[in-house]
Image (cartoon, rainbow, N blue to C red):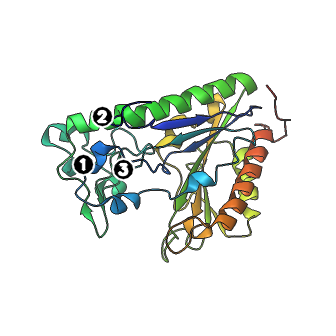
Amino acid sequence: MPPPSVPPAAIAVHRPAAHSPVVVSVPHAGRIYPPEILAAARVPKAALERLEDGWCDRIAAQACDAGATVVEALWARAVADCNRGEGQMAPSEVALALRARFSAPGRKERAGLGIVPTRLADCGALWRRPIDAAALHWRLESLHRPYHAILGRELAAAHRRFGHAVLIDLHSMPSIPPGQPGHGARIVVGDRFGTSSGNWLVERIAECAERLDVPVARNRPYAGGHILRTHGQPAQGVHAVQIEIDRHLYLDADRRPDSRRIAALARWFAALVETAAQAVPDGGALPLAAE
């Protein structure tokens, strides 16, 4: 056993007994807060927990049995957001010496949702001081870079076995408010407007989503972020799709998982993994490989 001062592993990789081309990414469901993070925060842990894709790892609980390799961030999103690129940060949120690295922030970064989440509505700043070079380096080396290295390795292995690979990046979302694109949708399937995956895969996944008998949207308001942009390379045979699930489909009023509803979603997601595993780029089907 490591000494108590050493945080537990940041990432888990679950491999199936019988492999398929599918790799599932769960980057935002981590619930472990290393002591360095809690010491640096100016808000209580409960505020940092609002960043989490609450309990959506439970939805992926049967994906390994369905043939997927599952890569899961165990550390909380407050450490580093694996779905943001290393250049995604608002200059005002970092120490002066770092500001030249973050000169063109987008809407999410300006709102404090960059590679290091720095603020939330009703909370203000999350950290006692701006993110400095040492804090950023620790976060990148401890979670963000290893996560992407593992995803890349597992996708490459799937591609070698099957001639193509499928990445399903699993997230949860708040209900989409009125006036926002996609309002009313309970599931959003993203493929970065056709650039991260072949349509043959997206259509199969959208069909699976519709079996839940809830409204499904495509790309709006969530088209996919850094994970799809980095790993979705359909021209090289790596197809990546993001799935966002409305948390009201499986959480109760206290943001705790409803066991019955989350079990139903886990069965649904396992069936979706099997469907994605059997689809091939020409739109046909392929039996699952066994190893």
> Mark 2 = which residue?
138
Q: Nearer the viewer, residue 81 or 255?
A: 255
The quadrant of the picture occupied by the C terminus is top right
- Residue at 17% in and 50% down: 129
- Residue at 65% in and 24% down: 157
Inter-mark Cα distance, 3 to 2: 13 Å
**In the figure, 235 relative to 114: above or below?**
above
Amino acid type of the residue tagged 3 in the rendering = Ala
Pointer 3 local density, CA inside 10 Å: few below 14, some 14–19, many at least 20: many
Query: Which of pointers 1 and 2 lies earlier in the amino acid sequence?
Result: 1
- The image position of residue 188, as x and y in percent, is 60, 60
> Mark 3 = which residue?
78
Query: Which of pointers 3 and 1 lies earlier in the amino acid sequence?
Result: 1
Pointer 2 local density, CA inside 10 Å: few below 14, some 14–19, many at least 20: some
- The image position of residue 89, as x and y in percent, is 30, 46
Amino acid type of the residue tagged 2 in the rendering = Trp
